[in-house]
Image (tube, rainbow, N blue to C red):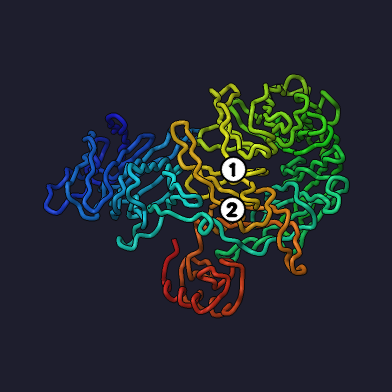
Amino acid sequence: MRSGVGAFRFFLSAETGGGGGEDSVAAVAAARAPGAPAAPTTAGATTLMLNGGLLNVTGTVTNFGSISGPLVEGFAIATSEARESVPLLSVQVDYIQTGPPPGGGADQSGSLRLALSLSGIIDDCVDVMGEATLGGRLIVDRLSASGAITQPLTILTASGITGFFDVAFLPPVGEPGKFLLAEVVPNAVRGGSASVVLTIQDLATLIFNLTGDADSLSGRPSAAVLGDFDGSDGLDIAIALRDSADPTGAAGDVIVLYNEGSTGPFWNGWSVGVVQYPAGVNPSGIDAANLDGSPGLDLVVSNEGDDNVLILVNNGVVGTGQAFTSAGTFGVGDAPSAVVVRDLDLDGFADVATSNSGADSVSLLQNLGVSGTWQGLGQTLDVNRVDLALPLTAAPRDLCAVQLNAIAGDELAVANTGTGSITVIANDPTLRAPWGSGRFTIQPPIPTGTKPITIDPINPDEDKWDDLATTNFDGGTVSILLNDTDGSSIGFRPHVEVPVGDAPSSLVQIDIDNDGDEDVAVVAEVSGTRVVRILRNDAPQDGMVTLSPPGDVTSAPNPLFVLAGNVNASVDATTDLIILSADGPAAGAARGAMLPECRVMINALAPPCAGDADGSGTVSFTDILTTLANFGADCSPGTGPGDANGNGAVDFSDVLSTLANFGAMCP
């Protein structure tokens, strides 16, 4: 049965329960004050499903509050004039809120909207007697700032919660480095149940824990790429390094750090032994993809001083013994500043593109595929290699592959440092051969801020198509260009400039707070110190994107650029931040020595259960033994077995924490 009035639309399901059937009605009523008449209920229905509709719950969050709302067919939203710590809305059955359909955007998902006037705190906004399955949007409107959230505000409680809101629209706190966090926690009052709670958190202390000693590097990092190169233990990292003494005139290297996996809830870091391969002069970019059809991701390195790309082919061995072998170099335009590898012609083999700062051009090399052995990359102009001319003085510095509309195949977007613009190269993969016969079309330049040096795909508005962001080195801003396609065209809304500090040099999209919408991490200078700045995406709603005041990650010295990926995927599903720095305290070096480094900041939104030293999911006698066995040990905060409180030392407080949580089931 489907019913709805105005902004309300519900889908009811009565798959189980006596007297059900299509005409069953679910009863939804606000909890009533003592002595108040009971709200109408009807037995038989088992589920309230919100699928593509909007459920508005408005009210005043006080100890003596009220709610109001229309009577919708099959649903009674009652009012009570005087209540003590009772929910705004009570759902007497199961609650299902769905996310967007495949290929759909956030605007096609179910939405729960809470409009709250904060003058106090109640126990629950929505109380579900049955199970809750969550997806889609959570929208929280603060109608008044007269009351602060000084303790956890419970948004929803249910007997059990699966899934989570795909998109959370939460009001900005207004204080730099602070944000509203929505998460699922066990409900201690209602045994066996769980709650979605809202708290104000400090970005620097909650989001990232420094895990493991940073890895010192033998050269200055210019680019890096994440990928599971050895087929085991999760994401590894390959880093292009310029020569420390002569970065633009001498040959550099590529190093690979392998992921050592996790022990229980603790990530073991990168491999101790660094695997190193020679590169060309001034290696400027690196990317990974399968080039030769055999197992394993291969590496492509752009050498700015040699006008070529180096191919390192993966031997396909899983785990120990994996290695790369040089498959030679292939010529591109003058001074390639960046490289991207994608299957542009959709033939199953990844092709190669470079931005060439010395030639104001983009080189596109077709992968020639496999005929017994890999045939390499195209070098014959206008047959299997194309050099596309950009406007004079464009000085392209970076490029990326993006999906801008519904037409199959990626486009390319180029950051033009010299002209303060980007260029989109449209791709028609239906034109199979020859490679250069009208397949790629240069679009008119699109303005950005001053001197864009990086360009990245982002999707802050949570729609189907990629948007673009540039870091503008001389402008001190990030330009955000929201996609304005109708599904077949290529177009953008006018760029929006977001001030981020001086000389921004890198940007990555990352869901910092695990709320389903993508935030932004950017490297910039603040008061003479280079930091990583986090801009939370607070409200991508109705075509608008709101970024909160930035919070800074300052524990990584002199950061150059950032990447994002889940390095401890066997432990959690959150995205971690990888920071490549120009200078860091060299492990084991003389006092005061500084070397470039690779530092990983583990996303701590899903921290290990305190006391669960073995990661079994239960605090048991084994955990006490583990803590005692490691008593007195020092470790990096939060990484060592037995370090229950994450302070970097296994001591008596950890024993007490383990005993205090004995028998606990970790969420």
Q: Where, by quadrant of the figure, is residue 434 drawn? A: top right
Please tell me whether mark 2 or mark 1 is closer to you in this view.
1
Q: Position of residue 328 (x, y in %)?
A: 86, 42
Residue type at the position of mark 2: Asp
- Foreground of the two, 655 or 551: 551
Looking at this rendering, what residue extends furthest in the front direction? 527
Q: Where, by quadrant of the figure, is residue 412 drawn? A: top right
Q: Position of residue 422 (x, y in %)?
A: 67, 29
Indicate whether 662 appears above or below 377: below
- Foreground of the two, 602 or 522: 522
Looking at this rendering, what residue extends furthest in the top direction? 438
- Foreground of the two, 276 or 649: 649
Q: CA distance from mark 2 to mark 1?
A: 21 Å
Q: Position of residue 470 (x, y in %)?
A: 64, 36
Q: Residues within 10 Å of mark 1 (few under 14, many from 20)?
A: many
Q: Could you tell me which residue is drawn at 28 percent across and 54 percent down?
A: 122
Residue position marked by numbered label 2 in the rendering: 576
Circle nearer the N terminus (2, 1): 1
Q: Position of residue 481 (x, y in %)?
A: 58, 31
Residue type at the position of mark 1: Val
Indicate whether 298 appears above or below 641: above
> Is residue 8 in view from this perspective?
yes
Q: Is residue 64 left or right of residue 323?
A: left
Q: Is residue 125 left or right of residue 475?
A: left
Q: SS class of the residue under badge 1?
A: loop
Q: SS class of the residue under badge 2?
A: strand
Residue position marked by numbered label 1 in the rendering: 500
Placement of the C terminus among the 4 image quadrants = bottom left
Q: Residues within 10 Å of mark 2 (few under 14, many from 20)?
A: many
